[in-house]
Amino acid sequence: MNGTTAPDFPSNWGRWGDDDELGAVNLITDEARARGAAEARTGVTVSLARVTTPFPLTGGPMGATTASTTAVQTAMLFTGFGAPAMAEVMIVTTHHAEVTHLDGMSHWVAGGKVYPGVDVADSSGPTGVRHGAADVYADGIQTRGVLLDLAPGGRLDPGHPVTGADLDAAAAHGGFEVLPGDAIVVRGGWDRVNGSAEPEPGMTADAIRWMHDHGVAVYAGDIGDARPPLPDDVPGALHFLALGRLAIPLVDCAEPEALAAMCQRLGRWTFQLVIAVPRIAGTTGLPVNPIAVF
Amino acid sequence: MNGTTAPDFPSNWGRWGDDDELGAVNLITDEARARGAAEARTGVTVSLARVTTPFPLTGGPMGATTASTTAVQTAMLFTGFGAPAMAEVMIVTTHHAEVTHLDGMSHWVAGGKVYPGVDVADSSGPTGVRHGAADVYADGIQTRGVLLDLAPGGRLDPGHPVTGADLDAAAAHGGFEVLPGDAIVVRGGWDRVNGSAEPEPGMTADAIRWMHDHGVAVYAGDIGDARPPLPDDVPGALHFLALGRLAIPLVDCAEPEALAAMCQRLGRWTFQLVIAVPRIAGTTGLPVNPIAVF
Amino acid sequence: MNGTTAPDFPSNWGRWGDDDELGAVNLITDEARARGAAEARTGVTVSLARVTTPFPLTGGPMGATTASTTAVQTAMLFTGFGAPAMAEVMIVTTHHAEVTHLDGMSHWVAGGKVYPGVDVADSSGPTGVRHGAADVYADGIQTRGVLLDLAPGGRLDPGHPVTGADLDAAAAHGGFEVLPGDAIVVRGGWDRVNGSAEPEPGMTADAIRWMHDHGVAVYAGDIGDARPPLPDDVPGALHFLALGRLAIPLVDCAEPEALAAMCQRLGRWTFQLVIAVPRIAGTTGLPVNPIAVF
Amino acid sequence: MNGTTAPDFPSNWGRWGDDDELGAVNLITDEARARGAAEARTGVTVSLARVTTPFPLTGGPMGATTASTTAVQTAMLFTGFGAPAMAEVMIVTTHHAEVTHLDGMSHWVAGGKVYPGVDVADSSGPTGVRHGAADVYADGIQTRGVLLDLAPGGRLDPGHPVTGADLDAAAAHGGFEVLPGDAIVVRGGWDRVNGSAEPEPGMTADAIRWMHDHGVAVYAGDIGDARPPLPDDVPGALHFLALGRLAIPLVDCAEPEALAAMCQRLGRWTFQLVIAVPRIAGTTGLPVNPIAVF
């Protein structure tokens, strides 16, 4: 298999028209939507977002000399003497592993084009994104979510190549079938930020094909692209194939630990999933906090 | 009535303990939560967030000489020659009328203290917020939302003082009763950013007292504090009393037009409301996109 | 003449070695340096920088709805309750016409290479500049400066193509000869930011050739590249040829009005010029405030 | 001596009028200016600014997990496909020990007022500085500079309290007298950023009184306020007394190592000093690169 062209791999380019910006979210039909709504029963919620602790932008003699790098920096603003309000400014580097974020179609470029075939120079410019921005999902994504826990109570082996068979086993463990229009949440038990020097597991082209076969509408998870790349597989398969080829938006750097604990406690691996990016126009990605409702 | 002290006005300081950070969100009991979940039927979603169009941070000979000011600025990043990904950095001034945002408890200071009585110097410092940050709601707020449309199909008169009677009338129009733990969405048909020179309507102390009497857990709306302040009322009543006294988090600068249209179309003024701020720690507020699910 | 390749135009690539980062500043010999020092007599100073008025990053109900775009934005920081110090954070878009700035060699790319032949991918990356950064001049540029006032007391005609003959005339007016290692300050009386819709004058390839013939080490001025481009000339000649081909660093968007007034008052068109960029490493340009000492 | 009020310490508040913004820079008379100019002979320059290496604002899978904190962050901008120019945006936290910067009068507040008695609420607001901004020096400061090397070829003892006698000894070592209107450069051989856990030396109230007695116009140096504060002295004497009381602008976090080497080599401890802050209006401080010309 050729990592650059992957000629035999399925593609959704053109499947929903030449101007489409939603990609696989089109798979969320009325039926899928209602299936998601039906999962909301007690109304108990769990967040799929990791905690992002900003680095404070301050100076002065007491400033730290080193700091964890993070997706967000904040500066507490001076609002006036005796002002009744406190406020801050935030600087956000969205595509940073420290923040759970949604990758829009414009984030990925293949052969000089973005989904579904728009020249990248038409999609993106110095002033922002004109096609495939992340806020095309700002009306809210609501569908059934399912947890595919690849290592219940533990974590995947270092460098583990996640395959379709792994995903099948996880679905069987949860007692559900993945249906077209579902959002999958993949848990491997890996913290992608503060990891050790061990090789990180990653999604294989085989797993992405499985996603295609099952009609997955959205991907979220703590397993992304393996580092280092997996031998004998498409490098960066999740971004290259799932986002770039199948037009499945990615909730990158999600944190499914609390979700896994809740599923385990309730004995229930399906839920209503609501994904609402901030309605900020013209970007390649946005911080997001997907909420599972039980 | 004394705008600074409003001594007779009810207060929730201490109601949920001396360390509480959630405020009126504590009113979302299991019963309220389930009532919210029960509203999700078809799974159709509507966003309550206004569109925020960033101002691009660029230079060069072609730069514009004036621009709309906005809550967000973006700079498209150089990701490398031939890089497969596009990305940007965002600068966000959260408490700006151009972006729908959630005000946390730490945003408001009364008499040198923030809810429920923490000295502001303990709550906030140059490096960020330590008590009452907006991300205390990052596990997700899920409850029943109700639309209180004060001017169906139109807009409130300039300078209109919104009272409890107005809210009663809107609930009657929608055919529902506001119950403890509900989130209210108030629509007055006013765009708070690009308004004319006309006086803006605003919530009165009477309306805030009504919110208290009905056990409102969250406020969202396009009506905030009147500008100029209303004669014979507490200045800035929504922030001063609802946020500062009753500890009701505010979804400030919401945009309920699409919601009102959907309610009208479905003949249904209640819905599941899911509010998920990005999980960014230690800030006084965060951009948010509340989603109504029908 | 071919705007893209300008094959007959002189080039300084290689003149000072394959690793050089200083370009024409190498022309400032000991003799030129001493000539500059000799100009300092009374010690009276004049700034060649335009005033940059930052746009304040604030939110709140009182925020303006439009603003002049500018190279710098500032946010006054909260430094603590009762803190003895006030401070701010600045966001600087260096290559903006609102700020006087120095263009380093890495700012300009010709045929995929930067001076003196370094592949742009070796010169610049997502994390900054590795060759030809603006701070290579941070030890200070000190030489003789000369004012070439093209329109004493007035301004150039709209769209005027500045030629070598114009520069000769200005030198004659000032009663000096331009010598190798001099820095020239060109004044046309045009404000490049808030101009009208009139065509802006610009430097022609002929003028750039004149700069080469006279051994100009640094360029500063209020005349840059004509907008729209001049017919029958190399488009963007100042950047393309002076910076890109001759490796003359540009003090872009300078403001020579006060200098011209001083020269007129003193009857003296030469001076010591001291240029000191902030010592910030790894950028393509930096704000700068060149000082003329008389 | 009372650290807060220091009642017996001299003050320059009112000395140059109630509206003055320049402070001790007023001491640079025509005579002092000419004395500075006379120092420029060969035109050789030395920078007094430390190297500030920005932290790059990037995301992506390869991002570092920790970094040195620094005054400046940069993001290389996407300028377009095939664009001939490279550019970046910079975020600057001016009052950070990693960047040599000038403290303006508005930086320091004493008893709710800034020099020469302006209420801080009139001097500073959420949108910036209105009195005593750093750019009041943007026309350029030019005077004689003198190096007071407190530890030639080495460094001061940890926690050393720098007194007037120390400054006298350094002047004697350099063979010069400090005259009214001079700028002093103090070198103690301490790197204030990456220091060890040892106590840092600092300027005492006695040294600041010496500065007053000698008519010092500007201070620059690698010695600031001792950390921890010196016993039996005014805490933060340099900022509290020199900046706050005597209105001497401070070039904070200067780096005089190269200057000391040059002085040693030339056997000459006096020079022309040119200080030119970027002409950015309305801030409490600005990065600066003072240049010594020999």
Image (spheres, coloured by chain):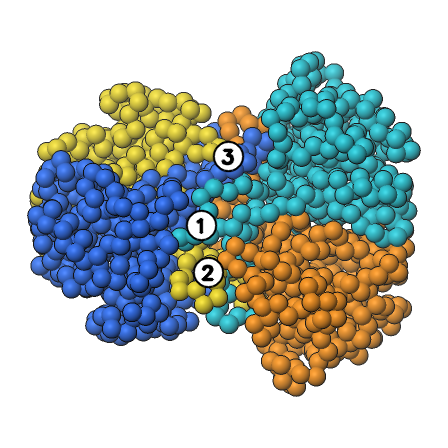
Chain colours: A blue, B yellow, C orange, D cyan
Give the percent coordinates (x, y) of residue A60: 58, 33
State the residue at coordinates (39%, 44%): A197
- Chain containing the residue with disc 3: C
Task: Describe the element under mark 1 as helix, strand or loop.
Answer: loop
- Chain of residue at mark 1: D
Q: Residues within 10 Å of mark 2 (few under 14, many from 20)?
A: many
Q: Is residue B50 visible?
A: no
Is residue A55 among the parts visible in the rendering? yes
Q: Amino acid at mark 2?
A: Thr
Dot 2 and dot 3 within a common chain: no
Q: As shown in the figure, which amino acid type bears the numbered disc 3? A: Phe
For the point 84% across and 61% down, the residue is C29
The answer to whether the residues at label 2 and label 3 have Cβ atoms under 8 Å apart is: no
- Residue at coordinates 33% horizontally, 60% vertically from top-left? A231
**Mark 2 = which residue?**
B79
Query: Quick one: which residue is furthest to the front in this view?
Result: A231
Nearest the eye: C266 or D70: D70
Q: Are marks 1 and 2 in contact (CB under 8 Å)?
A: no
Q: Quadrant of the N terminus of chain A?
A: bottom left
Does C116 sit above or below residue D3? below
Q: Position of residue B5 (x, y in %)?
A: 36, 23
Which residue bears the numbered disc 1?
A: D63
Q: Are marks 3 and 1 in contact (CB under 8 Å)?
A: no
**Would residue A179 be found to the left or right of residue B80 on screen?**
left
Marks 1 and 2 on same chain: no
Which residue matches tag 3? C78
Distance, label 2 to label 3, CA atoms, is 33 Å
Mark 1 is surrounded, within 10 Å at the Cα level, by few (under 14), some (14 to 19) or many (20 or more) other residues, namely: some
Q: Nearer the viewer, mark 3 or mark 1?
A: 1
Question: What distance separates the C-alpha of mark 3 from that of mark 1?
Answer: 29 Å
Q: Please, what is the three-letter code of the amino acid marked with disc 1?
A: Gly
The percent position of residue B161, horizontal first and vertical second, equals 28, 40
